[in-house]
Image (cartoon, helix red, strand yellow):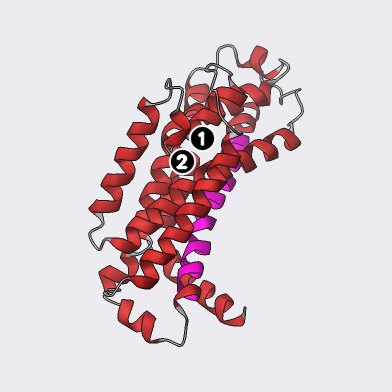
């Protein structure tokens, strides 16, 4: 555990200096910032909107539609594809493997750091969404603070579900990033599978495409626009895919002759 903690700390320091930090922050703020900008430029109707019940639920639905379908999958695909590029770009894989760490510690440390990225994305997104709801009431004197209370328990439950839904993307992109030196390969594969997941949404067996669980979860639990005949809840299937891809990723990493 001490060795793993040191490995995680080392990987965290590497990640902090990379582009992924700004990618996660930008992804979290993007949609709420657009909604805030529209409300500041078009304040008509804000007074009635802020005085209505279910204000925060409607704002959540507005923000999450683009987040679940586009922003979060793309950010994770990019961030996970970049995780191994830190070593490839600086030609430091041999230095990493020369340290007294087993392959399992290196693999798990990078994976744990990678898993913090969707968590950070959710934190920034929720903070930005809260700001998008509060700032217009501070800017315009005729707009009062939302009368509707924030449903913290509901939002926490949905955040947890969407985080689990994203895990297959994390694991498969991590596997591809470790397997292929060229950054464009995991990025291209990830984009192709994501597009396939969007296209397969009306299909009865859409759950076999592992990148679509956020969209499936959103359309079933948030807006209920599509009926899906799933063999289990979307987070349960996503957790199974994550376990499968993680095991496969470690096997690919540990048995590969050339590790960089």
Q: Residues within 10 Å of mark 2 (few under 14, many from 20)?
A: many
> Which residue shows up at 46% across the image and 69% down it?
107
Q: Would residue 80 appear left or right of 230 to someone viewing this image?
A: left
Determine which quarter of the picture holds residue 93: bottom left
For mark 1, does the 10 Å Cα neighbourhood hold few (<14), some (14 to 19), or many (20 or more) residues?
many
For this rendering, which residue is in front, 133 or 241? 241
Q: CA distance from mark 2 to mark 1?
A: 9 Å
Helix, strand or loop at disc 2?
helix
The x, y position of residue 125, in whole percent, is 55, 41
Q: Is residue 118 magenta?
A: yes
Observer-nearest of 168 and 187: 168
Q: Nearer the viewer, mark 2 or mark 1?
A: 1
Q: Residue at x 29, y 49 (%)?
A: 187
Residue 185 showing in the rendered view: yes
Helix, strand or loop under label 1 = helix
| Magenta segment boundaries in residue numbering | 105-131
Magenta highlight on residue 20 = no
**Does the rendering let one see residue 124?**
no
* Residue for badge 2: 72
Classify residue 249 by image quadrant: bottom left
Looking at the image, which residue is at 37% across and 86% down?
A: 98
Q: Residue 200: where, in percent of width, then height? A: 39, 26
Q: Of marks 2 and 1, which one's residue comes earlier in the chain?
A: 2
Which residue occupies 75% across, 37% down? Answer: 153
- Return the residue at label 1: 214
Expressed as whole percent of the image width and height from the top left, the position of residue 14 reads 42, 70
Quadrant, the C terminus: bottom left
The correct choice, above or below, for 111 with respect to 42 in the image is: below
Q: Which residue in the rendered view is the most extreme toward the front?
A: 231
Mark 2 vs 1: CB contact within 8 A: yes
């Amino acid at each position: 555990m001490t060795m793993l903690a040191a490995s995680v700390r080392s990987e965290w320091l590497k990640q902090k200096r990379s582009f992924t930090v700004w990618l996660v922050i930008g992804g979290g703020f993007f949609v709420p910032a657009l909604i805030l900008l529209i409300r500041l430029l078009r304040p008509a109707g804000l007074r009635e909107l802020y005085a209505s019940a279910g204000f925060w639920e409607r704002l959540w639905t507005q923000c999450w539609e683009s987040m679940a379908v586009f922003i979060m999958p793309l950010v994770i695909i990019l961030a996970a594809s970049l995780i191994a590029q830190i070593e490839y770009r600086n030609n430091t894989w041999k230095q990493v493997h020369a340290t007294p760490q087993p392959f399992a510690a290196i693999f798990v440390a990078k994976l744990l750091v990678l898993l913090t990225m969707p968590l950070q994305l959710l934190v920034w997104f929720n903070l930005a969404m809260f700001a998008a709801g509060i700032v217009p009431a501070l800017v315009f004197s005729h707009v009062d603070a939302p009368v509707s209370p924030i449903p913290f328990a509901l939002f926490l439950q949905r955040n947890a579900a969407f985080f689990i839904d994203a895990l297959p993307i994390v694991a498969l992109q991590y596997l591809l990033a470790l397997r292929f030196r060229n950054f464009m390969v995991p990025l291209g594969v990830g984009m192709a599978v994501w597009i396939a997941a969007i296209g397969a949404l009306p299909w009865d067996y859409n759950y076999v495409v592992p990148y679509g669980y956020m969209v499936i979860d959103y359309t079933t639990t948030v807006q209920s626009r599509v009926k899906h005949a799933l063999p289990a809840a979307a987070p349960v299937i996503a957790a199974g895919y994550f376990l499968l891809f993680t095991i496969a990723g470690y096997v690919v990493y540990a048995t590969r002759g050339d590790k960089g």
